[in-house]
Image (cartoon, coloured by chain):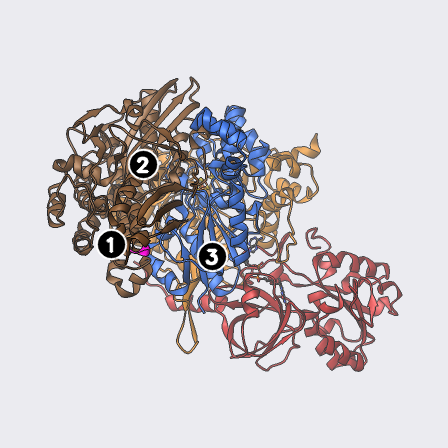
Amino acid sequence: MSYYLATKKELIDWIQRLAAENQLYFPEKHGEASYRFNRVGPKSEIQFDRYIPTVVPPVKLLVPAREELLRFRTDAEGKTEVQPSLDTSFRVIAGVRSCDLKGISLMDLFFKDGVPDAYYLARRENTAIIGYSCNTPCDESAFCAAVDSLDHTEGADVYVTPVKEGDLLVEVKTSLGEKLTAGVDWKKCEDPEARRIGAVTARPEPFGRSFPAPLPDTMKIVADKYQSAVWEKHVKRCFSCGTCNLVCPTCYCFDVVDDLNLDAASGNRSRSWDGCMLPHFAEVSGGHNFRAEPAARQRHRVNRKFTYLPEKYEHGAVCVGCGRCGRQCTSHIDIFDIVTDLIQEGSR
Amino acid sequence: MKPKVAFFDFSSCEGCQLAILNCEDILLDILNLVDLVEFRMALTETAPRYDVAFVEGSIHRDEDIERILDIRARSTYLVALGACACIGNVQARSNFVAPAVNYGEIYGEEARNRVQVDPDYWDLWSHTRVRPIDAIVKVDAYLRGCPIVPREFLHLVKSLLQGTQPFFPPNAVCVDCKMNENECVLERGLTCMGPVTWGGCDSICINSGYVCDGCRGTLPHANVEAHIELMREHNIDDRDIRSRYRLFMGAEPIGRGV
Amino acid sequence: MMNTSTEHYHQLARDAFMPQPGRIVEIADMTAKDRYFRVELEKPLGHRPGQFVMVSVMGVGEAPISISNGPGDDNTLEMVIRRIGRLTQVIHDLKVGDTMGIRGPYGSWFDLENFYGRDVLFVAGGLGLVPLRSLIVPVLAEADRFGKITLISGCRNPAEELYCDQLNEWTEAGLEVIRLVDCTENMPWQFGVGLVTAPIPKLKLDPGKTVAALCGPPVMYKFVIAALGARDVSYNNIYVDLERRMKCGVGKCGHCQINKIYCCQDGPVFRFSDLALLPEAL
Amino acid sequence: MDLKQKTYNIDVKHVTRVEGHGRIIVSTSEGKVKEVKLSITEANRFFENFVKGMSPAEVPWIVSRICGICCVGHQLTAIKAAEDALGIQVSPQTILLRKLLTESQFLQSHVLHVYFLAVPDFMGVKSVLPLARTHPEVVKRALRLKKLANDYTTVFGGRMLHPMASTLKGWRKLPDLDEIAALRKRVQEAIPDIQETLKVVKTLKIPPYERETEYVSLKHPDEYALYDGDIYSSDTKSSVPVDNYLDVTNEFTVAHSTTKWSKWHRDSYFTGALARVNNNFDQLQPEAKQAAEDLGFKAPCYNPYMNNVAQIIEVVHCAYHSARMLDEVLGSGLKEEDISYEVKAGRGIGSCEVPRGILFHDYTFDENGRCIAGNAIIPTSQNINNVEQDMKAFVPQMLPSMSQEELTLHMEMLLRAYDPCISCSVHMLDVEFVD
Ligand SMILES: Cc1cc2nc3c(=O)[nH]c(=O)nc-3n(C[C@H](O)[C@H](O)[C@H](O)COP(=O)(O)OP(=O)(O)OC[C@H]3O[C@@H](n4cnc5c(N)ncnc54)[C@H](O)[C@@H]3O)c2cc1C
Ligand code: SF4
Ligand code: SF4
Ligand code: SF4
């Protein structure tokens, strides 16, 4: 573990240097007010200043929207050979906020559990992550502090905290991080803990939105409110378009489809993002749908974040408070509002 | 035996047939797998029976009805090719104006009178109502969009060759849009038909900086009330909301309803 | 920059998603839309009653299908597949000698330990008889280790009854088989008419000693469980075999989730008392 | 065979290998031509009426659906009309991009027409399919060129059919410079394919038939007019501004048909590749002029079958001209532009050359920017009269020497030579011919 104090310029130069040698991804502005983790090229601008969480979280680099699982070919005798298609290329994701870092840590948990997911783990092992701490809430949608993800640093190989104007505390947290920072000539930091505490205490309080109840109580209320009018209230405006699932850093459900090539002998099996808010997600062949109503789907999504997965993995909330689902919902249905309504429903 | 495949067209821009001719990379491969027996845009031949008939275009006149019934009777599997055949497309907007008025405004008084009074002309030109083909005959599969998506066409062809049904997930365009990491145009104060529109187009219009206008038709589960409400919140006048819904979907229940 | 153990991941991927070839050695029509397949695998499945496999045809897709034969250590896999969608349509077109991809077995199972020394009641609706058969076979094989064994098997109409010959055999072997149809639809039928719940109130069973195993369409469970409850059969002793949409079979894709559990891993066989707190289960 | 006995009744109900539905009726009795008629059997779609209520940006996007092959042309022409109505000025960058989009469409349409629709005729086969077996290299080359043209449209338009990237004032999303650079390279690499195409066209046996008529096209002082220009007539050797288009098209109804036909200084006129090459030969790229010479094309040329040759000359022109424009874009780069505008009441007229001839769009908007009147006149409705005049002249001339089959084929070929785009018959009523 090494600690440095670097200037913004030093850090950017370093990132650009890494980008020249590796596939490196960094949030880049696109559209009017959105960001996207793009591959950094010689012409890209590295902007460490404020950016709101990207449209799609950096998890996309570990679980792509569409990813090939198997490739097959049948020979003339009718024998089919099947091969897994794994991506083990090395990449660096830089500028990952704490909420997204926690998202990645949770994905690590989900994909390692039970039957380990080779595709995820192969990518994950070959991915270096450079985290970046937030000193102010990114916008009014986020509520990372409310779900304990503001100070999440686990999963980062290098973690950067702006400590005071112009100075950045660079924590090198893993041996991979050491490799990435080998040869940097930054100033060593002697008092990292004090500096970090300084940065943390300088943050505004409260930091972004917070629930009207402490997190453990909040989670219990969500679990208890299986029957609630709140589930019906918000879905009146819901299109079942799945945006909230697809942009969430802790949603990982997928669909599997096969594709045959025109030679009729080869092809592939791939998986792609799916979402429990999509109307047919829980429909079985023959037509029975276990969550046919939008309200049932909404309840399932919220419970997955606050009850089901936390129980399954004995973990805190699985929502990291990035605010993406509310920010990007076509109808601005906000999970924060839903949970708040659940909390307030009884107390009125 | 290779399946006998035929293409037919009714009122349309013929762009969907062109979209198939535009699959240059795979066109020859596909032609090796099927027996193309009718394709008026590129062939002179005709045939009596078809395993798969692709029908482009919307139905307008009595003679169109006769022809589509005949095609249906001679085909085992019938595919509605493109927005005109699937949902009626832009021309269905003229359903909201009396045919005689349409004739009058475009061709003048004389034409209007002839269309109105002369029964012979009425038969020939009767522009009764623009309808998708499933208003007349059973359709086995829909290739949506204006124009169709080559990937979906390919999926359909492969599925039929495999002896199974193609499957097009009934998900909103927003799904494609998210997979493409687009900034939602709602963020820019524009409105989009994406949330109520049948996806699968790769949100191509939004990728190019436009909005979705709904060329693939509305989803079975579309929350139209909420969508209209959303447009109103964006200060879109009810007249323009109706116009948006009738841009591509004038022949759909939704286009007629708003 | 990194040295990775690519081979390690290839192995994991193969373990998780790679099917082994299964050669079809017998096909038989059971009903107009259900077809029996006997498949020979390269290596034995080593399954337990109630488990399922993921069956695939490369280039078409993959689906969960119950194992119908009883446990054993040979390479045989028996299934009954209903022609209902994309994949099953293609599977129905396969011929003896063709191969399909098989991975598994997956999921929880009926543990015979819980059945020994008790009266056993099987309730099967339609295709539900297929997975139950993998339990009925071993139970009948050691019939003397159980009390009274009863099977209620119902289907829509006489033409849809599965395993007719087997039901006759089982009857001859001393199993009490109650065969029902919802409606005869004017077809010849020598057995009963009615829902599978109908015989339950009159069954000669000792509630304290009975264990029940249920499998059928989603609508069936609630009513059968209510009928059994009315007979004081304890929820601890009712086992259900549930169906959900499944895409991976290994607890990742999320489709089969029932509240906090994953049907493909925690199920498909559940002790009903374990489901009591899961409102989405039935 | 005794000429006197030649009694033909030709009725080609669905002319194939044209876009849209056409019907040819010829009847001759004892060596005399009784009737020659061309009918359009496409159902009406009333575009001009149903665009009412749409916004200035929606109109071009929707009228693109008039025709799949000419979608780019309809879109750009309607955009020009809407801009004219709203008094919008466009930047040189936008004009350059529009010209690129235009030429991509000329390449696509001409390649498709020559290879898929016309060449089979000249090779004596019924379609391009048998050619895939007998002349695979020809078909593969055709597909390569078509793919290049399609990808070209996609780079600038967002997709190859009904592109959505361009709009009033400019581009919703600018094309990607890396893609432009890749395209530039491919245009270069396509030169051998174009040369080979010239060789194929050179071997085609063009029927020797001539009928001089009026050739009408756009004309621009600085360049071979495709995107912009005034309306020029070979009869008067002078131009009129686009705003006077109604004086040119003079749409009229004829007794046997309610199709609106056009004529200007004489009974009918010709618009399209042949008219453009005839009228603006000097402004072709040098490589295209060379190609014309190699193909034995001399302007003015009065053989309508030579329209296919004129199309190939334009393919050469567009390929080389595009390459030069692409270099220009790559040299200067592209910059984001403000594409916002104010709506106001007004009428505007736009015109472009599209592969089949001159296209006019004319729209009026109210003060809220809703369309209240529309008019579109497509090349086919201008040409159709000329096709019939050609047929009327052709049949008596050829009747003595041709069998019914030959005559039928030549009539179809003649119609196909015009490359009619009948589906875009915004202005056509069905016509029925009485025997
Ligand atoms: C544990 C278990 C055991 C089973 N045992 C058996 C058995 O023994 N015998 C038997 O016949 N069946 C059994 N089933 C049911 C069987 O899995 C389904 O019938 C089978 O999946 C049908 O597959 P298909 O491809 O033919 O059907 P389809 O429904 O056509 O599915 C094809 C694909 O199309 C897509 N799709 C289709 N409809 C939708 C939609 N509405 N929304 C989203 N995507 C859609 C999906 O990608 C799907 O995978 C079992 C199921 C489970 C869970
Ligand atoms: S549920 Fe919403 S706020 Fe929570 S992690 Fe997912 S996208 Fe972010
Ligand atoms: S831009 Fe349209 S399609 Fe995309 S997410 Fe927004 S509403 Fe949906
Ligand atoms: S984005 Fe909308 S308008 Fe565009 S292709 Fe898709 S469905 Fe059609």
Q: Secondary structure at mark 3?
A: helix
Q: Can you say whether B175 is above or below C237 in the image?
A: above
Q: Is residue D43 left or right of residue C163?
A: left
Chain of the residue where label 2 is placed in the rendered structure: D
Q: Which residue is mark 2?
A: D385
- Give the blue chain's letter: B
Q: Colour of chain C?
A: red
- Give the brown chain's letter: D
Answer whether residue D193 is visible to the viewer in this image: yes
Q: Is residue C253 left or right of residue D368?
A: right
Q: Measured from the top left, where is residue D401 in percent x and y?
A: 24, 54
Q: Which residue is mark 3?
A: B156
Q: Secondary structure at mark 2?
A: helix
Circle 3 Cα neighbour tier, 10 Å, few/some/many (<14 / 14–19 / ≥20): many
Q: Measured from the top left, where is residue A236 in percent x and y?
A: 62, 35
Q: Main secondary structure of the magenta part?
A: helix
Q: Which residues are magenta?
A: D401-405
Q: Which residue is mark 1?
A: D401
Quarter of the C terminus of chain D within the rendering:
top left
Asked if marks 2 and 1 fall on the same chain, the answer is yes
